[in-house]
Every structure is written in C-alpha cells, then in structure tokens.
Image: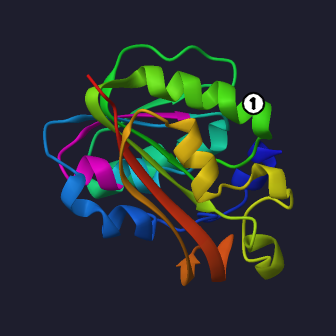
Amino acid sequence: MWEDRFKAEGYLFGTAPAQFLKTHEALLTAGQSALSVADGEGRNAVFLAEKGLSVTALEYAPSAIAKAEKLAKARGVEVAFHEADVLTAPFTGTYDMVLGIFIQFMGPSARAALFDKMKQAVAPQGLMLLHGYTPAQLAYKTGGPPQAENMYTEALLQQAFAGWDILTCRAYEAEIREGTAHAGRSALIDFIARKPV
C-alpha cells in the first residue's frame, strides 16, 4: 500500500518538516544522534540533518526512500536511509532522540510492540518525540487512518511511557498544510518524554 502511495509524482506530505518539529526546534541539538521511524519521503529526517544532527531514518517503501535521498541531496545534507519494516526489523544501537511522526498505521498491539522497540533505542536521558492524531481527527478527514484505535490520546501516551519524564503531552486542534495528504483542520497531539537513567 505505502509503495503505491509514494511512487506517485511529487511529495505526498510535502518537503517541509512537520510543524511539530519546528515548534520544538529548541530540542534539536547539533551533534546528537536521531532515529526517525517510518520516515516517509524524508522531510523530517532532512530537517534534522539540516540542524546538525546525525540522522538514521527507517522506511518501508523504496520509492519513498528514493525521494528522501533526492531531497537530502538537494538540501546538501547526509542521512542514513534504510529500507526496513519497522514492525518486524530489529533496531540496532541507541540514539539521543527517537521520533515517530504520523506513524499511526497500526493497531494497539502492533503499536505497543513498536513503542517497546523505540524505547529501547532511546539512550538514557534521551528523548522520545511522537506526533500524530487524536480520535477527534476522524470527524475532520484531513489525514490519517480511518481507525479510531490507531489514534493517540494523552492518557494512552502517558500510560505507554509511565516512568519517563514527560515534557510535553498536549492534544490540540490546528490548521496544517503538509502536502496533499495532511491538509486542513486537524486534531493533533504532541508528546515528548525523557528516558530515565
């Protein structure tokens, strides 16, 4: 499915980073390492690299990776793009920051397993950054999956990261324009937590 979506001309979600990253840009420290999970066409990984981070990006669709590599080259940055099914592939190493931006393509059990892998990939005192939709997004139909169980709530994320230092956990509504796939009034949630030592 994702390969079919991404092999169309143009960038489905645009080439600018998610507004979430720009809002929390102060957390992006040059020289740190970052892992972007299910990165898509590279807009977020490339932005991180432009901020001086050492970025590894995982993505399932070869056509998305080809676009991401083209974007990185055009912006004059290097990103380690890897073709991987994030649900089944092991994650190697640890990172100062692990990101999952609009990765709500799975149900609760698969999400729990992926979150566990992402947690293990965060170095002690490192950050987890998640951004996505709340169930209220179903009424807007401006992006995201049609399944309410795939969406995040503040309580769900707080429970999933119990014991972490939660820096941001906020549901809100905003107008977004991220390519043709994310456009219009949207029900969003930002989550940032620091892993304990």
Q: Is residue 111 left or right of residue 189?
A: right
Res 39 seen here? no
Which quadrant: the C terminus? top left
- Of helix, strand and loop, which one carries label 1? helix
Q: Residue 84 location, x and y as percent?
A: 61, 25
Q: Is residue 74 left or right of residue 1?
A: left
Give the residue type at disc 1. Ala
Q: Which residue is mark 1?
A: 110
Q: Is residue 11 left or right of residue 128?
A: right
Q: Residue 53 location, x and y as percent?
A: 22, 41
In this rendering, the answer to whether 96 lies above or below 151 is above
Q: Residue 164 location, x and y as percent?
A: 39, 36
Q: Residue at x 64, y 58 (%)?
A: 153
Q: Residue at x 67, y 31 (%)?
A: 112
| Magenta stretch, residue numbers | 47-58
Q: Residue at x 37, y 44 (%)?
A: 193
**Magenta span contains residue 34:** no
In this rendering, the answer to whether 41 lies above or below 117 is below
Res 31 seen here? yes
Residue placed most toward the observer, 62 or 96: 96
